[in-house]
Amino acid sequence: PQNPDVTVQPVGAVGLASKQPISNGSASPKGNISGINYQSVYMKIFSSRNFPNKVVSLPNSCFTYDERDIEGKKCFCAKFSSPGESGALYASCEMDGGVFEGGRWWFVDQKAAKSAAFHSFLQSMINRGILLDFRRDSKGRLLY
């Protein structure tokens, strides 16, 4: 039996999430950021080109994880604390393979949850005009 409080939202879907059981598949993030080097991208964003006198590294401790059992599977929600923004916090967001429960997006592995949190950060950079899109900074230079 399906849990009525668990929803899955496929990539590109608009409107309400459809109720489906959580899958074992890996997440395929919007913006195609899976497999990128977060450190390299982050340092390019927070280089002197975009933020004068600010080159910031990205330690692994910037990512933290919450764990929850959903439909008998261990799931993770990641939080990303951005050191270049005095610890601004970004949580895992909607991605393929994610499950929305309790007001948060959960994934069956930490890698997918981490990708979703970094995606939230990149989306914020786009919204603020620091990036043109997921691959280019405001001057059109490639990040990865």
Image (spheres, rainbow, N blue to C red):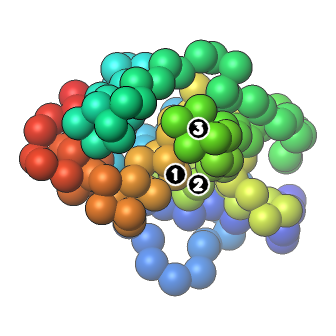
The residue located at (70%, 20%) in the rendering is 61
Using the numbered discs, state the Cα–Cα distance from disc 3 to disc 1 in whole angstroms.
Answer: 11 Å
- Helix, strand or loop at mark 2: loop
| Residue 115 image position (x, y, % from top left) | 51, 36
Q: Which mark is residue 93?
A: 2
The image shows residue 77 at horizontal and vertical percentages of: 73, 41
Q: Which mark is residue 120?
A: 1
Q: What residue occupies the far left of the structure in this picture?
A: 140
- Direction from residue 56 to residue 46 in the image, left or right: left
Give the quarter of the image for residue 111: top right
Res. 22 visible in picture: no
Q: Do the residues labelled 2 and 1 touch (CB within 8 Å)?
A: yes
- Dot 1 amino acid type: Ser
Earlier in the chain: of badge 3 and badge 2, it is 3
Labelled disc at residue 95: none
Q: What residue type is labelled 2?
A: Cys
Residue 82: give its label: 3
- Residue at 43% x, 20% y is 39
Q: Nearer the viewer, residue 47 or 6?
A: 47
Q: Is mark 3 on a helix, strand or loop?
A: strand
Within-10-Å neighbours for mark 3: few <14, some 14–19, many 20+:
many
The kind of residue on which mark 3 rests is Ser
Residue 15 picture location, percent across and down: 52, 83
The nearer-to-camera label among 3 and 2 is: 3
Q: In which quarter of the image is the C terminus?
A: top left
Q: Distance between the residues labelled 2 and 1?
A: 6 Å
The residue positioned 67% from the left and 28% from the top of the image is: 63
Which dot, 3 or 1, sits closer to the camera?
3
Left or right of 6 in this view: 42? left
Residue for point 42% across, 41% down: 28
